[in-house]
Image (tube, helix red, strand yellow):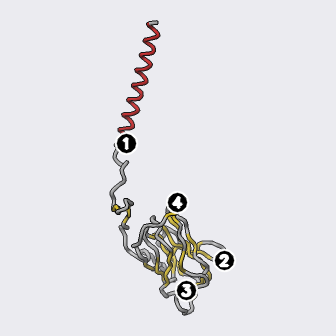
């Protein structure tokens, strides 16, 4: 009988000790540096959402390339994205279907709302869906348009090298760096060397 009570007391003591150790470890892990969101350059809005200000405001292509460098600009201001559940739906406004964009003229690529995260604009061949090049490698989280002269594109999403755009039928594709923000594709449009009215 005495041995039985001793085993019970030891067992209870071990369980209590384990609970104390687990609670202490959880408390210590919860207070570790890095758990709280980093301040960075984020600012808090009245609604409690964090908005980020891009550190780079340079527009257009990268420097140092011996081949054609894409040029363009876009707004880095906008409102918070409208979410559908946990999903942000982006749709392209321009280029419109069968629009004709002349190389060398300024054309506005526009979408309905900011994505809230960074993204890229690419030029896609309408005939087979392959990427002809990247129009802009870094779309800001608040951006809703980009002005492009249709002259050249980057050869990849990370390269500073560019190449001239060949006249033809294309689509513009907008993709974001987050799975909960939809990509968007424009209607087919034409890029031509001929002088036409910009859309």
N-term-proximal mark, 1 vs 2: 1
Q: Nearer the viewer, mark 3 or mark 4?
A: 4
N-term-proximal mark, 4 vs 2: 4
Q: Mark 1 to mark 4: distance in Å?
A: 29 Å
Under tag 1, what secondary structure?
helix
Which residue shows up at 50% across the image and 61% down it? Answer: 178
Q: Nearer the viewer, mark 4 or mark 2?
A: 4
Q: Mark 3 to mark 2: distance in Å?
A: 17 Å
Badge number at residue 163: none
Residue under pointer 2: 127
Query: Mark 1 packing: few (<14 Cα in 10 Å), some, or many (20+)?
Result: few
Residue under pointer 1: 30
Image coordinates of residue 24 in percent, x first then y, are 36, 34
Outermost residue, front side: 47
Q: Mark 3 to mark 4: distance in Å?
A: 36 Å
Outermost residue, top side: 1
Image coordinates of residue 181 in percent, x first then y, are 52, 63
N-term-proximal mark, 3 vs 4: 4
Which residue shows up at 38% across the image and 74% down it? Answer: 58
Under tag 2, what secondary structure?
loop
Residue under pointer 4: 85
Query: Mark 3 packing: few (<14 Cα in 10 Å), some, or many (20+)?
Result: many
Q: Mark 1 to mark 2: distance in Å?
A: 54 Å
Image coordinates of residue 41 in percent, x first then y, are 33, 62
Above or below — where is 102 with respect to 11? below
Residue under pointer 3: 101
Asked whether residue 169 is in view, the answer is yes
Which residue shows up at 38% across the image and 29% down it? Answer: 20
């Amino acid at each position: 009988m005495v041995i039985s009570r001793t085993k019970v007391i030891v067992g209870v003591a071990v369980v209590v000790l384990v609970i104390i150790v687990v609670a202490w470890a959880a408390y210590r892990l919860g207070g570790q540096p890095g758990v709280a969101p980093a301040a960075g350059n984020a600012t808090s809005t009245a609604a409690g959402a964090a908005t980020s200000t891009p550190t780079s405001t340079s527009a257009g292509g990268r420097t140092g390339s011996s081949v054609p460098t894409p040029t363009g600009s876009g707004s880095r201001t906008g409102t918070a994205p409208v979410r559908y559940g946990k999903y942000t739906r982006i749709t392209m406004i321009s280029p419109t279907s069968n629009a004709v964009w002349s190389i060398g003229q300024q054309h506005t690529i526009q979408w309905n709302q900011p994505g809230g995260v960074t993204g890229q604009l690419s030029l896609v061949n309408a005939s087979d869906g392959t990427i002809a090049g990247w129009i802009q490698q870094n779309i800001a989280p608040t951006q809703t348009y980009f002005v492009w002269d249709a002259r050249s594109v980057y050869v990849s999403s990370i390269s500073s090298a560019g190449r001239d755009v060949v006249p033809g039928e294309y689509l513009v594709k907008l993709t974001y760096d987050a799975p909960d923000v939809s990509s968007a594709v424009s209607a087919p449009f034409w890029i031509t060397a001929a002088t036409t009215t910009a859309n």
